[in-house]
Amino acid sequence: MIEIFGINQSQEVDRFIESHPKGHFMQTSYWGRVKTEWEWIGVLCKDDSGKAKGAMGLLYRPLSIGISGLLYAPRGPVCDRDDLQTFEELINAAKAIGKKRGAYTLRLDPEIPEDDVEFADYCRGLGFQIDQASDYSLFQPRLVYQLSLKDKTPETLLASYHRSTRYNVNLAVRRGVTIRRGTVDELPIFSALMEETAAKNEFHPRSKAYFELLMKGMGDYARLYFASLNDKLVAGAIVVYYGKKANLMYSCSTPDSFKDRPNELLQWTIQSDMIELGCDLYDFRGVEGYPEEDNPKIGLHKYKQGYDSQFLAFVGQLDYVLRPMVAKLYKFLTQKKR
């Protein structure tokens, strides 16, 4: 049995996602309140007794050309990996929603491992195309690092780090680095730090307005942290937690603070807080390429490995084309702009 909910009637969907081992905050209505340019639609699948067994948070965004739109389930759907019946019921419900709204494509990017060939083949059999890009071109990073927090204390967590990372945490303490929670009113400071980091590392940062949407939309599930040295803010991070999972969303630091290692102390403090909140998993988010020595981005891999986190490659970005001609037109127009 399928039930459909709008963003203001989302409590049952959000509760199920929060309780499920594969739940993800991007499937909730809270994320829908962050993504204001999209319409959030909640889908709940129940068994014959009325008990929820699967859910999907969908985002729909009309195209600028006005003839169609994209229907997207970030990190969804949420159901047991082996319950393919529920998975298919959710997919069929999403297809029906997509067709009703005239969407050209239904897109998913579930947290299913890349080596789960059976699942990938099953999805291809349903008509999905799978993109396994190893850079940041997909909607969500396919290659990530995740750290288990289960059954750890802040002390055992620190002991599990690579010795150089552990040394850097202690070095930051000796240098006088301190960590504190930030407030929404301090987001302009965080945004300025992010712009400084972006200039150094040559990427385009999110705007202050977006960080405000993120913090306000996620409410109590989002936290802002700052690291200070000699009364100067030198690093910051935004983390989102939901259910048993925490996700590092953004981190930044001033280039001249590198020698004092504020980021390592910042990360240990955040992860320790997530343990106190009952989280079992800490997601460091994306990296480019695989952890191979000839990868020019291997430095970021090694940094995240220092926290005893594990590399994971997900199955990829799954697209089910609902309107082939519109999909081809949209692809043509977007390629032409590049």
Image (cartoon, grey):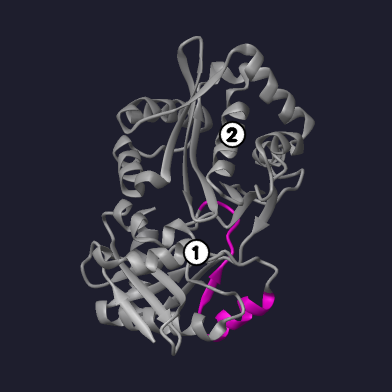
Q: Residue at x 62, y 77 (%)?
A: 119
How far apart marks 2 and 1 lie (CA) works out to 26 Å
Tell me if residue 41 comes above or below residue 307 in the rendering: below
**Magenta stretch: includes residue 121:** yes
Residue tagged 2: 267
The residue sitting at 61% across, 76% down in the picture is 120
Quick check: 263 left or right of 191? right
Residue 265 position within the rendered picture, expressed as x and y whole percent measured from the top left = 61, 27
* Whole-percent x, y for residue 20 in the image: 52, 66
Magenta stretch in the rendered image: 117-136
- Image coordinates for residue 107, horizontal then vertical, percent: 43, 70
Query: Element under label 2?
Result: helix
Is 2 located above or below residue 43 in the figure?
Answer: below
* Image position of 118 with respect to 294: above or below: below
Q: Quadrant of residue 72?
A: bottom left
Label 1 amino acid?
Ser
Using a 10 Å C-alpha cutoff, classify the residue at mark 1 as few (fewer than 14 neighbours), some (14 to 19) or many (20 or more): few
Amino acid type of disc 2?
Gln
Question: Of tags 2 and 1, which is closer to the observer?
Answer: 1
Which residue reaches farthest top?
230
Q: Residues within 10 Å of mark 2 (few under 14, many from 20)?
A: many
User: Which residue is denoted by mark 1 in the rendering?
Assistant: 19
